[in-house]
Amino acid sequence: MKLLTITIPCYNSEKYMHKCIESLLPGGEDVEILIVDDGSTDGTAAIADEYALKYPSIIRVIHKENGGHGSAVNTGIENATGLYFKVVDSDDWVSDTAYREILDKLTELTGGEEVLDMMIANYVYEKEGEKRKKVIRYHHVLPEEELFTWNDVHRFHKGQYILMHSVIFRTKLLKDCGLKLPEHTFYVDNIFVFEPLPYVKKMYYMDVNFYRYYIGRADQSVNEQVMIGRIDQQLKVNKIMVDYVVSKKQFLATHKKLRNYMLNYLDIITTVSSIMLIYSGVEENLEKKNELWKYIKQKDPVVFFRLRYGLLGSYTNLPGKGGRKISVEGYKLCQRFFKFN
């Protein structure tokens, strides 16, 4: 068994997948690299096969029909043989020094009396045109250099949530919890770092800048105009997350810190949905925003009250054109401060 499986979902990635793969090769024989070619129509498949021929004991390639990012991640989980599981998108890469430190720590923790479910590390916004890099750290929120539980976690600040870039999960946990990301849907990475959380008992945080998250391309899924064009997929993910929180209501009632974290994360996702719908300036999308909030209220009035009358919910539901303008300007201010796309 390999120590770590790293899945690289690839769709028409020929221009940048080399950098991603090369950054992962220093893991050597401890690492299984699964390149999932999600029905690419460019040179992605050939490049992936070349790497597999060159590194047959490290790299495996899976060619499949196009199903979207979630489908590629699902395929990675299904085929993973590593004890732990990580997703690295094909236009991102990892830091060599931090990578080696993380592998050493995973080796150290493997086989101990306590089972590690989720490792967390920092990620860096590699934003196009930005010389100063924004680092997302968790050093005031999570205990360092020790195994801990949700009871030991402090309050997360806005913009500091655990993303796909941050985490390495125990592979068996992902399989046992039945995680299945929707196909042909963007923004499913939010589900990936949401649905497994009630199954996570033991965590470990390393204050190292591991994942390099590249943003700034005009065609990226997190580009605002692209998001507006795909707003129905964002809303689909948003509603799946609402449904999941409601389905886990009884469990979360006895796990207060986990409940607070998940509701706060859902608050962020709902705010993004609301702001993008307002930002579009299209009357149809304003109606979709109202429908989203009605959906949440119908699913669970308590969750609705928490989201709607919190700071973010109140800010994204200011009345009239003037209120919507204030909401958008507030979003732009946060964007400049937090450096997200």
Image (cartoon, rainbow, N blue to C red):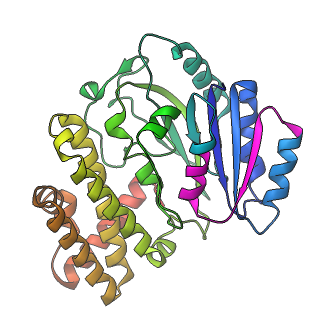
* Residue 154 sits in quarter: top left
Which residues make up the magenta segment? 54-76
**Residue at far top of view:** 113
Check the image and report above or below for 27 versus 164.
Answer: above
Check the image and report above or below for 327 versus 152.
Answer: below
At a point 83% along the width and 53% down the height, the residue shown is 47
At a point 31% along the width and 78% down the height, the residue shown is 278
In the picture, measured across the screen, residue 92 lies left or right of residue 297, that is right
In the picture, measured across the screen, residue 62 lies left or right of residue 200, that is right
**Does any portion of residue 91 appear in the rendered image?**
no
Q: Count the numbered circles shown.
A: 0
In the picture, measured across the screen, residue 275 lies left or right of residue 21, that is left
Q: Quadrant of the N terminus?
A: top right
**In the foreground, 47 or 176:** 176
**Residue at far bottom of view:** 283
Check the image and report above or below for 308 versus 155.
Answer: below
Check the image and report above or below for 117 versus 71.
Answer: above
State the image coordinates of residue 112 (x, y, percent, origin top left): 48, 11
* Residue 82 sits in quarter: top right
State the image coordinates of residue 240 (x, y, percent, origin top left): 34, 60
